[in-house]
Amino acid sequence: MSKKIFSGVQPTGNLHLGNYLGAIKNFVDLNNDIQNECIFCVVDLHAITVKQDKDQLSNNILETAATFIASGIDPTKSIIFNQSKVHAHAEGSWILSCLAPMGWLNRMTQFKEKAGKDKEKASVGLYIYPILMASDILLYDATHVPVGEDQKQHLELTRDIAQKFNKDFNCDDFLKAPEPLIKKNFARIMSLKDGLKKMSKSDPSDLSRINLTDTKDEIINKIKKAKTDSYPIPDEEKKLIDRPEAQNLLSIYSSISSQTLDKTLVEFGGKKFSEFKNQLAEILSSKISPISEEIKKLINDQEYLNKVLAEGASKAEDIAGKKIKEMKKIIGF
């Protein structure tokens, strides 16, 4: 069955292994399925919900597009564009903001996590971020959206908004309620220095993450120095309880190898982590270092990247622009 896929990545710079295994690797698989129609967006409007450096943001937009292509997303098969180039996203977001009740937004846990104790100082944009995400998805009649645990609640909100619009304006199925695409056998990728913290570009230690721009030697060195414990690798998942660093490295191996954690434990059960780390470093460097080299090559060809984004934006505008015109007609503009 064919699927219409929409997903996006924020251009925050320093994309890392967690971004690759959590999203981009899956995008490549979806792109390679000829039955799918895929739209991948560099969500630069979402990025400015927190303060950005102007020049850095411009560079990050290009780097994110380069990462998509270097990882294997073919711009001749899928649409790749940056959100701010398609006006319908912001327009649709305003229309949907006037429809969604405050109570729905107040239930969004990610705002509470990101705003922290100073939520009064957080931008309005950060608060209504899920409405813009709903606009992104609904403008393209997406049937499926790849989401992780942190975005499932936002996709549920998108579905609720679509259903409310259709009901309020008596236009059954005008806005399509998308289904989530949950990646099976995927574990959240944690810091290489602390198995209880998510891998993040904001961590002050570069040794805590594998950047997608790391060289082969850097990847090997980081895995070699990654935190583990002194016990051998178990042969059952239940024996990994209270061993977060061990579980994280084994999960990374499983995800990059596209196999279950159980299979990895059968493969390495009883062995020392020193032996396992050699295998993990080898497979990671073989998968990530070619992407790193290609990213650097593409970043040096900004003319090509800008061409891909411009062509993608034109295709996206054709789809989203038509939808927003229909939406305006329905509401009486």
Image (cartoon, rainbow, N blue to C red):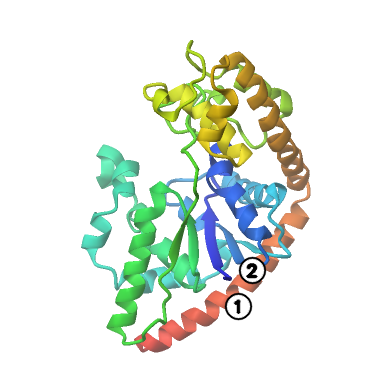
- Nearest the viewer among 24 and 115 is 24
Q: Nearer the viewer, mark 2 or mark 1?
A: 2
Q: CA distance from mark 2 to mark 1?
A: 21 Å
Asked if residue 161 lies left or right of residue 245, the reply is left
Amino acid type, mark 1 = Asp
Q: Residue 146 location, x and y as percent? A: 50, 56
The disc, 2 or 1, on the residue closer to the chain's N-terminal end is 2
Name which quarter of the figure residue 20 lies in. Answer: top right
The residue drawn where x is 77% and y is 56% is: 303
Look at the image and tell me whether residue 66 can be seen.
yes
Name which quarter of the figure residue 100 lies in. Answer: bottom left
Residue that numbered label 1 is attached to: 318
The residue drawn where x is 53% and y is 59% is: 7
Name which quarter of the figure residue 106 lies in. Answer: bottom left
Asked if residue 323 lies left or right of residue 280, the reply is left
Mark 2 surroundings within 10 Å by alpha-carbon count, few (fewer than 14), some (14 through 19), many (20 or more): few
The residue drawn where x is 60% and y is 42% is: 258
> Could you say whether the residue bearing mark 2 is in a helix, strand or loop?
loop
Look at the image and tell me whether residue 333 can be seen.
no
Q: Which quarter of the figure is the N terminus placed in?
A: bottom right
Q: Residue 226 location, x and y as percent? A: 55, 19
Q: Residue 166 location, x and y as percent? A: 34, 81
- The residue most toward the top is 230
Asked if residue 200 lies left or right of residue 98, the reply is right
Q: Is residue 164 above or below residue 155?
A: below
Residue that numbered label 2 is attached to: 35
- Nearest the viewer among 332 and 272 is 272
